[in-house]
Each structure stands twice: as C-alpha cells, then as structure tokens.
Image (cartoon, rainbow, N blue to C red):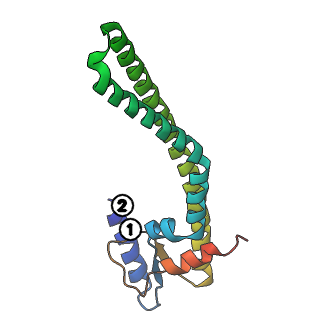
Amino acid sequence: MKRYCLLFAVLGVFASSALAEVRVGVINMERVMRESEPAKKASSKLEKEFKKRSQELEKSRQQAQTMQEDLEKNGAALAESARAAKTKELADLSRELQRRQREYNEDLNARRNEELQSIVERTNTVIRTMAEKENFDLIVQEAVYASSRVDITEKVIKALSEPAK
C-alpha cells in the first residue's frame, strides 16, 4: 500500500510538472548504514562498550562446556549423589549463562537502536540539506530499481563523513 501511495505521489509530481524538469534522487539506506563514517564509528563504539561482557560470556560458555565434558567423561565413575550434584551445578550454570546472554542481547540491541536512531536523524538532516541545495523535487530512501544517475547514496555517505555543522 505504501509503495502504491509513493508511486501515485511520484506520478503526480511528474504529471503536475510535465514541462518542468523533475529532479529525483534515490538513496540505499542499507549501504549508508554499512559504509558511512558515523555508522562505522557507532559499530566500533558498541564493540568496545560490550567487549568485556562478551568475553565474560565466552569464558562462562567455555566453563560450562568443560563441565559438561567432564561430567560425560567421568560421570559414570562418580557416586550417584556426586553425579547429581554436578548435574545440578551444570544446569544452574547453564540457566545463569542463558539469563546473562539474554540480558546482553537486550542491552546490545537497545544501544544499537540508540546509535542507529542518531545516525538516521543525522542522515535525514544531510538529505534535506542536499535536497534544498541541489534542488531535488523528490528523494526516495529505498527503491526496487534505481538508475545510477539518480542514485545519490555516495554523495550522502561523503556528506556524512564531513563534520556536523
């Protein structure tokens, strides 16, 4: 439905200004979010911010794996009560690891969304400024197909690498 509305809007612009030249630009936002300087900085910032927790989770995973292997290897030789205690300890560790992993994922996703929101706001500001300066009538952020002559993704990526004004 959204695409039809957009199509009708584009057709309306073309029809209403049949004699005037209509300037259209298309942006690949996925590429902007992957290649722009602010996106790269945000990615490395998040990586640094969550590195310690990630390492702690990996250490806990390895500990649980070692405990599992030890229980499988030596479990038959243990007394029933000792085996039950080890099994309970492994189950508790696994549950705790799952809880911590879930919290880590939630925190990481929340921070990633904050960073992405900031990048999207800045990108939209850059796009508006570019549209006004270069007299674009319409800029579309996603399209099924766009000719290279209307693709302004590279311009947006370059503009984002410049310091914010």
What amino acid is found at the position of numbered circle 2 in the picture? Lys
- Residue situated in front as seen by the camera: 74 or 132: 74
Q: Which mark is residue 6?
A: 1
The image quarter in which residue 135 lies: bottom right
Q: Are marks 2 and 1 in contact (CB under 8 Å)?
A: yes
- Residue situated in front as seen by the camera: 13 or 101: 101
Q: Is residue 55 above or below residue 12?
A: above
Task: Identify the residue at image location x=56%, y=41%.
Answer: 53
Categorize mark 1 by other alpha carbons within 10 Å: few (<14), some (14-19), many (20+).
few
User: Which residue extends farthest top?
Assistant: 81
User: Which residue extends farthest front?
Assistant: 77
At mark 2, the secondary structure is: helix
Q: Dot 2 corresponds to which residue?
A: 2
Percent position (x, y) of residue 142?
40, 69
Percent position (x, y) of residue 72?
29, 26
* Separation of residues labelled 2 and 1 (CA atoms): 6 Å
- Residue situated in front as seen by the camera: 158 or 138: 158
Q: The C terminus lies in which quarter of the figure?
A: bottom right
Determine if residue 137 is in view: no
Percent position (x, y) of residue 153?
49, 77
Determine if residue 29 is in view: yes
